[in-house]
Image (cartoon, rainbow, N blue to C red):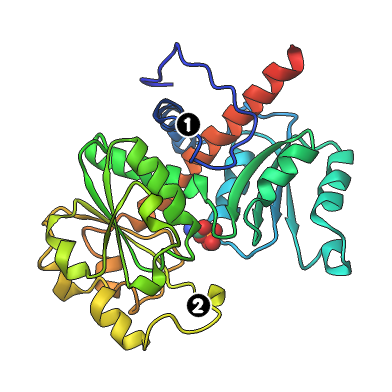
């Protein structure tokens, strides 16, 4: 597994968030992911790592990247993969989350990958079932594998996050990606600035290890990395800014604004993109963008997470 710290022992059976992880644990996941990257370059893209294990993708919210990436990652590790969706299951008849999970567990599942609109749903599951639980995004709380693939991508581009100035711009209030990014990036030594209108800043922002800036133009020149967040209209009860046009004018990453950024600034976005709103198409598809690299890197990161939680669960079973 490449340069992985061989003395370190991974012990977590679940991955619920990054807030409680140490820098060493985050680094260990990234090193493990490096080792898994080569599986996807083989002519037969398979490793026997999770043979005989059952992974359930339990998605209560829509997803393209995370859902497919976890499914593919589990398939590449030779697990049996079950894809569960809210609309075609008995959840539509009123079955609760816990009843759903316990019934799936009765069929012999080992790992649950869950996305849910309620913050804390993965933690609740982890306390009530024996299977490992991986958080694939819970409410406004965390989206740990997205942040892991974000820092993995930056580390691949720059070697390290130490001392980098990273801007996270846009709808931070509704963003679980931003919360997980803040923990991962600052633990790995980056300086993070949140950029957006006051209405899109999270509550108690002063308690987070970040700087806050209300004008993208004030910081664009000094950033090494900018992560543009999607405006999440579906989570907004009422309008949080006067108009889409005004938002785009002050906070959109435009070709014009990019002229003032460093030549080698790394442009990121977790997807899905609102083209022409938070980012112009020429920038999203331009030379500084690593948006599709983020998606590719997510596969190795999710293979690493599946491998590590399964390894920890199996070690506990033996004790
Ligand atoms: N980045 C992300 O979580 O995308 P999906 O909602 O498509 O999974």
Q: Mark 2 points at which residue?
A: 233
Disc number at residue 21? none
Q: How crowded is mark 2: few (under 14 residues within 10 Å), some or many (20 or more)?
A: few
**Residue 36 badge:** 1
Q: Residue at left 72%, top 39%?
A: 126
Q: Where residue 123 sits in the image (x, y, percent)?
A: 67, 44
The structure residue drawn at horizontal position 44% and vertical position 42%, both measured from the top left corner, is 148
Q: Which of 239 and 117 is in front in this view?
A: 239
Q: How far apart are marks 1 and 2 (CA)?
A: 36 Å
- Which residue is at 44% across, 21% downward? 1
Residue 297 visible in image: no
Q: Is residue 150 above or below residue 175?
A: above
SS at circle 1? helix
Relative height, residue 158 to residue 230 (above, below): above
Residue 46, position in %: x, y? 58, 34
Secondary structure at numbered mark 2: helix
280 shown above or below 24: below
Residue 100 rendering spot, x and y as whole percentages? 84, 52
């Amino acid at each position: 597994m490449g340069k992985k710290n061989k003395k370190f022992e991974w012990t977590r059976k679940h991955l619920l968030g990054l807030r409680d992880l140490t820098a060493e644990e985050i680094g260990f996941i990234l090193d493990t992911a490096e080792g898994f990257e080569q599986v996807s370059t083989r002519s037969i893209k398979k490793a026997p790592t999770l043979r005989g294990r059952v992974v359930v993708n339990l998605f209560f919210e829509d997803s393209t990247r995370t859902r497919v990436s976890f499914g593919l990652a589990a398939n590449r590790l030779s697990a049996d993969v079950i894809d569960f969706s809210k609309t075609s299951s008995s959840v539509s008849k009123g079955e609760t989350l816990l009843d759903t999970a316990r019934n799936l567990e009765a069929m012999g599942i080992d790992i649950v990958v869950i996305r849910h609109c309620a913050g804390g749903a993965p933690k609740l599951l982890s306390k009530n079932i024996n299977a490992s639980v991986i958080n694939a995004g819970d409410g406004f709380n965390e989206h740990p594998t997205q942040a892991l693939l974000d820092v993995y991508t930056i580390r691949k581009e720059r070697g390290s996050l130490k001392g980098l100035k990273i801007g996270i711009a846009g709808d931070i209030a509704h963003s679980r990606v931003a919360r997980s990014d803040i923990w991962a990036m600052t633990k790995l030594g980056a300086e993070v600035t949140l950029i957006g209108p006051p209405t899109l800043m999270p509550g108690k922002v002063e308690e987070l290890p970040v700087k806050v800036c209300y004008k993208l133009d004030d910081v664009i020149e000094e950033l090494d990395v900018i992560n543009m967040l999607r405006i999440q209209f579906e989570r907004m009860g009422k309008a949080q800014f006067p108009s889409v046009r005004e938002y785009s004018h002050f906070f959109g990453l435009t070709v014009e604004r990019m002229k003032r950024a460093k030549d080698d600034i790394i442009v990121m976005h977790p997807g899905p993109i609102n083209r022409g709103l938070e980012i112009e198409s020429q920038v999203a598809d331009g030379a500084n963008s690593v948006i599709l690299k983020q998606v590719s890197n997510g596969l190795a990161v999710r293979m690493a997470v599946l491998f590590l939680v399964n390894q920890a669960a199996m070690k506990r079973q033996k004790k």
